[in-house]
Image (spheres, grey):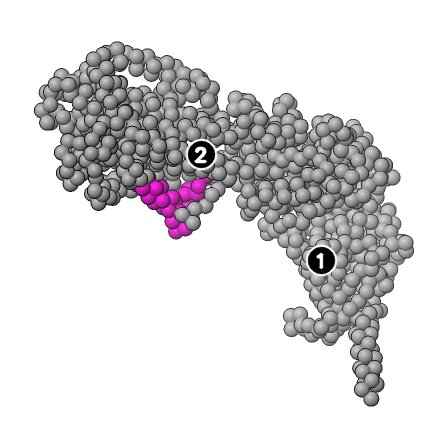
């Protein structure tokens, strides 16, 4: 009888443990499966602030398609760079192609954006941060639930698999229980030191909960980035042919 | 004393309103510390471009980067490489990984040899050593960073490579501690020698012990005051810097002087009347006024340092004055009290017989008095020779020159200086729209001027990045390695850099909003004259800027130039004001200007001879040796006041015959004994630091010149004027 009890206890423990691991993955899968708009147009204001509290601001128009795998950005501010634009295309082989239009030189140049840890336009977001994460690239562990700003959250530990080219050792992700959106993420560098904290805010646009603000703080560089998205349009009529070089030279009207 | 703060920051010596200091602070605030530590490692006869060396460079760079005390590391491992690869603009680290293959190493070598600025900063001239630049975090003391860098460097590299360390942060982080240890050790030797000289002449251990007790207590009060002021006010003017290292020696000599006068007078009186109480009373009666007067004049002289332009001299003067005041109080209270407690043996040699020096001085006195004119003429000749030597005096405040050339430390910093980028820097802070091509062109012109100096190894600024980006953008065409003519083009290039590279790469050359730029030139050590000429040319060029509205110059070369002027200014202010003050005080006290004038004769002569001798002997005036004038003035005035007071006392006592001889017999012995015991600090001659050696040698010379000046020039002058004084 005692033997049976011990065996049952061990089996129950393993089951619970397994369920817990599954739960982590399930949460991630649920997140991954959430409805996302096919395309989006927005006006982005990005304010960068350094450790000495000096700021600079960029205003851009962004258009994305194929669930952000294709993206075009046109710079509106600062004035000296107005008209500069970028085209980014994530290919299926996970390579990223990026082209830049330099109006002052009347030239288009290709940029190597495959160095995933490089910062995007001097911000605290790296190219890696901006790319969509593939579900199977990481292992997931559900941690104890927590609260962020009074909001009940699931907490996930996301560890990139060894085969993945990444500058992070792990992420801790807080997912709102209410709307199942990521509200905060802490990212750790390869030496397991806390590198960045990202906070996300959302707004409803056409039944989608779309990010309206991102606040990123690089704790090691003491640098922060605030990104605001407005004039957001989702799933509007968009010809995917615009994601090509010749579109770079024309500032969109909207 | 536990609150004393040791400060190794040379910049703290500069007044806060000095333009180079303001500019320095602005540069540090905007771009981080510009004082760096350099590590060079490699092989004497073998190229550094091999797999294992790159692997070790990678490890060293990463290990140093992981330390919070270090702000930035610059090495071949993490320098950005801007290139055009198959039509792609790439900005990435020169060394992509720890392990490299031969093709990658050759690629790095080719890139480095094609890029003069990177080459000069990252490898030695012969390509046999790597150079790593370590920029400390602003808030961390240089000695802390130095220890970390040396520990990491030695642990990773010492087995396989020859390692050298250098750079201003390394030197300033190492030197104060080394000088402190060196001086402490040699001061100990000096004190032992001093006690032996006193013991041989005074011949009583208790009496010598009492003199030392006065010295030690005064030193504690001086150091304690320094600590308490820092604790209570936080004033940086009371930090213990390299300048303050001469404070203990100066107070030792002055406190010793008070004690020696009291003890020798007491023994003399005991010899005459054999009564302890009477002897003490007579000694104090005779010495109270001269010791009071010598203390007042010396304190006044040191308090004039309050007005010196070097910040730390204010704390220096106040704390030293407190120590002198306490030595005065102890000499006239503690010392007689202690002596009254002892049962003195009247038959002891110390009391019953004259000392060796006492007998010599007696004979010497007769000689001086018999030939006053000849003595005066000889003294004047020596003084004129000394004065002539003043024109040869040179100033050098570069700490690197504090070390003998054959020491390991000097060899190491010389290696960095000669084989790498050099350890001196000039920084030009430019406040103007940085993206404006006119600004960039003027910055470029400045770099051309800087590079034209043969001692300058490299210069860099945002101009180099813009030019290189321009070239890479236009198909890597060398003809386009120029500043674009259109501001929008410059802006596009910099935006492109922020997209493809790491914005942090630009943090040390341009501010966040592209409104302030920094031009940096690294150079080998220059002589004082070279620095002054070089800085003059830079200042002229800055003056000629048409588009850059606001530019300021700083860097170690400028700091050294300013420190040279400050040392001269401080010395001149200190010498002139203290001499005038002493002359005034003694004139008022003796109610006669000529006595006041005579009191400064020995010390003025000694100062002139001392600095003249330094000029003739090629000894440089530095912020360490300049303070020797304080010792001369402090001790010199003591000697002359004791002499004059005794002379006037004998006149009042109606002594008319052989008065000068009697004065020399009375005060000559303690003066010479005081000077002889202070000469023990000649032990500093054995220091490993050149200026400390000079201090040792000059101490002997100063003691000799002040004592000799008093007993010859002053004695002969008074003897020649005795008819007017005797009326």
Residue depicted at 28% across the width and 35% down the height: B204
The quadrant in which residue B309 appears is top left
Chain that bears disc 2: B
Local crowd at mark 2 within 10 Å, few (<14), some, or many (≥20)?
Answer: many
> Where does the image place residue A133, in percent across and percent down from the top left?
82, 60
Q: Quadrant of the N terminus of chain A?
A: bottom right
Chain that bears disc 1: A
Residue designated by label 2: B186
Q: Which residues are magenta?
A: B213-242
Residue designated by label 1: A192
Q: Residue furthest front?
A: B347
Q: In the image, which is nearer the foreground, mark 1 or mark 2?
A: 2
The quadrant in which residue B316 appears is top left
Q: Quadrant of the C terminus of chain A?
A: bottom right
> Where does the image place residue B276, in percent across and percent down from the top left?
17, 39
Local crowd at mark 1 within 10 Å, few (<14), some, or many (≥20)?
Answer: few
């Amino acid at each position: 009888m005692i033997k049976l009890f011990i065996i049952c206890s061990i089996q129950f423990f393993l089951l619970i443990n397994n369920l817990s691991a599954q739960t982590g993955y399930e949460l991630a899968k649920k997140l991954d499966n959430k409805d996302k708009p096919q395309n989006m147009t927005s006006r982005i204001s990005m304010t960068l602030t350094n450790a000495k509290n000096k700021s600079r601001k960029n205003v851009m128009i962004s258009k994305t398609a194929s669930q952000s795998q294709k993206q075009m950005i046109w710079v509106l501010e600062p004035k000296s760079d107005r008209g500069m634009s970028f085209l980014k295309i994530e290919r299926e082989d996970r390579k990223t192609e990026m082209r830049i239009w330099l109006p002052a030189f009347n030239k288009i140049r290709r940029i190597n954006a495959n160095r995933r840890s490089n910062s995007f336009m001097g911000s605290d977001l790296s190219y890696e941060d901006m790319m969509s994460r593939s579900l199977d690239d990481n292992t997931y562990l559900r941690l104890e639930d927590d609260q962020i700003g009074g909001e009940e959250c699931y907490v996930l530990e996301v560890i990139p698999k060894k085969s993945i080219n990444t500058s992070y050792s792990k992420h801790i992700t807080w997912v709102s229980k209410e709307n199942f959106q990521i509200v905060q993420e802490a990212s750790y560098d390869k030496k397991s030191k806390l590198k960045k904290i990202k906070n996300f805010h959302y707004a409803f646009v056409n039944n989608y909960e779309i990010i309206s603000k991102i606040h990123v703080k690089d704790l090691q560089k003491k640098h922060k980035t605030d990104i605001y998205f407005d004039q957001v349009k989702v799933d509007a009529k968009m010809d995917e042919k615009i994601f090509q070089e010749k579109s770079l030279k024309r500032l969109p009207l909207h | 004393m536990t609150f004393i703060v040791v400060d190794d920051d040379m910049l703290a010596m500069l007044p806060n309103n000095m333009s180079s200091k303001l500019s320095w602070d602005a540069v540090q605030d905007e771009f981080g510390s510009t004082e760096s530590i350099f590590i060079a490692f490699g092989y004497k006869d073998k190229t550094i471009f091999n797999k294992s060396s790159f692997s070790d460079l990678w490890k060293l760079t990463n290990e140093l980067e992981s330390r919070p005390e270090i702000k930035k590391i610059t090495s071949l491992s993490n320098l950005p490489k801007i290139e055009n690869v198959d039509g792609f603009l790439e900005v990435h680290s020169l060394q992509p990984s720890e392990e490299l293959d031969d093709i990658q190493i050759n690629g790095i070598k080719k890139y480095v040899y094609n890029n003069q600025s990177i080459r000069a900063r990252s490898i030695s001239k012969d390509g046999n050593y790597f150079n790593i630049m370590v920029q400390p975090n602003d808030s961390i003391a240089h000695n802390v960073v130095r220890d970390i860098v040396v520990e990491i460097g030695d642990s990773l590299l010492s087995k396989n490579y020859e390692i050298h360390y250098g750079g201003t942060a390394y030197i300033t982080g190492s030197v104060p501690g080394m000088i402190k240890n060196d001086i402490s050790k040699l001061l100990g030797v000096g004190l032992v020698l001093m006690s032996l000289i006193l013991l041989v002449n005074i011949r009583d251990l208790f009496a010598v012990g009492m003199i030392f007790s006065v010295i030690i207590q005064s030193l504690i009060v001086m150091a304690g005051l320094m600590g308490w002021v820092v604790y209570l006010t936080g004033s940086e003017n009371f930090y213990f810097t390299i300048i303050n290292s001469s404070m203990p020696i100066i107070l030792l000599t002055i406190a010793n002087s008070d004690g020696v006068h009291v003890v020798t007078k007491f023994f003399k009186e005991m010899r005459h009347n054999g009564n302890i109480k009477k002897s003490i009373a007579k000694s104090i009666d005779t010495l109270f006024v001269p010791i009071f007067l010598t203390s007042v004049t010396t304190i006044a002289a040191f308090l004039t340092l309050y007005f010196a332009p070097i910040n730390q001299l204010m704390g220096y003067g106040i704390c030293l004055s407190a120590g002198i005041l306490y030595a005065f109080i102890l000499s006239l209270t503690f010392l007689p009290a202690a002596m009254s407690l002892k049962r003195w043996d009247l038959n002891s040699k110390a009391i019953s017989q004259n000392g060796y020096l006492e007998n010599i001085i007696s004979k010497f006195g007769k000689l001086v008095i018999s030939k006053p004119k000849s003595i005066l003429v000889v003294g004047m000749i020596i003084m004129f020779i000394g004065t002539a030597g003043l024109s040869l005096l040179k100033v050098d405040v570069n700490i690197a020159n504090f070390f003998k050339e054959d020491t390991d430390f000097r060899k190491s910093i010389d290696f960095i200086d000669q084989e790498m980028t050099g350890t001196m820097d000039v920084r030009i802070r430019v406040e103007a729209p940085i993206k404006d091509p006119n600004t960039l062109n003027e910055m470029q012109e400045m770099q051309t001027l800087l590079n034209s100096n043969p001692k300058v190894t490299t210069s860099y600024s945002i101009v180099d990045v813009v030019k290189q980006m321009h070239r890479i953008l236009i198909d890597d065409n060398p003809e386009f390695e120029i500043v674009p003519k259109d501001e929008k083009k410059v802006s596009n290039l910099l935006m492109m850099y922020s997209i493809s590279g790491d914005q942090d790469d630009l943090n040390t050359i341009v501010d966040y909003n592209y409104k302030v730029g920094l031009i940096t030139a690294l150079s080998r050590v220059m002589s004082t004259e070279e620095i002054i000429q070089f800085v003059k040319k830079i200042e002229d060029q800055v003056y000629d800027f048409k588009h850059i509205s606001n530019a300021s110059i700083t860097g170690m070369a400028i700091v050294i130039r300013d420190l040279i002027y400050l040392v001269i200014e401080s010395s001149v202010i200190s010498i002139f004001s203290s001499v005038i003050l002493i002359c005034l005080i003694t004139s008022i006290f003796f109610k006669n200007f000529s006595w006041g004038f005579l009191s400064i004769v020995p010390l003025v002569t000694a100062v002139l001879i001392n600095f003249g001798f330094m000029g003739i002997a090629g000894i440089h005036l530095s912020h360490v040796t300049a303070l020797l004038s304080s010792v001369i003035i402090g001790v010199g005035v003591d000697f002359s006041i004791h002499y004059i007071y005794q002379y006037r006392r004998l006149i009042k006592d109606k002594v008319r015959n052989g008065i000068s001889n009697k004065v020399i017999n009375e005060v000559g012995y303690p003066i010479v004994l005081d000077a002889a015991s202070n000469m023990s600090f000649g032990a500093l001659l054995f220091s490993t630091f050149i200026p400390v050696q000079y201090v040792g040698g000059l101490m002997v010379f100063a003691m000799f010149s002040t004592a000799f000046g008093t007993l010859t020039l002053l004695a002969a002058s008074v003897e020649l004027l005795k008819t007017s004084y005797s009326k």
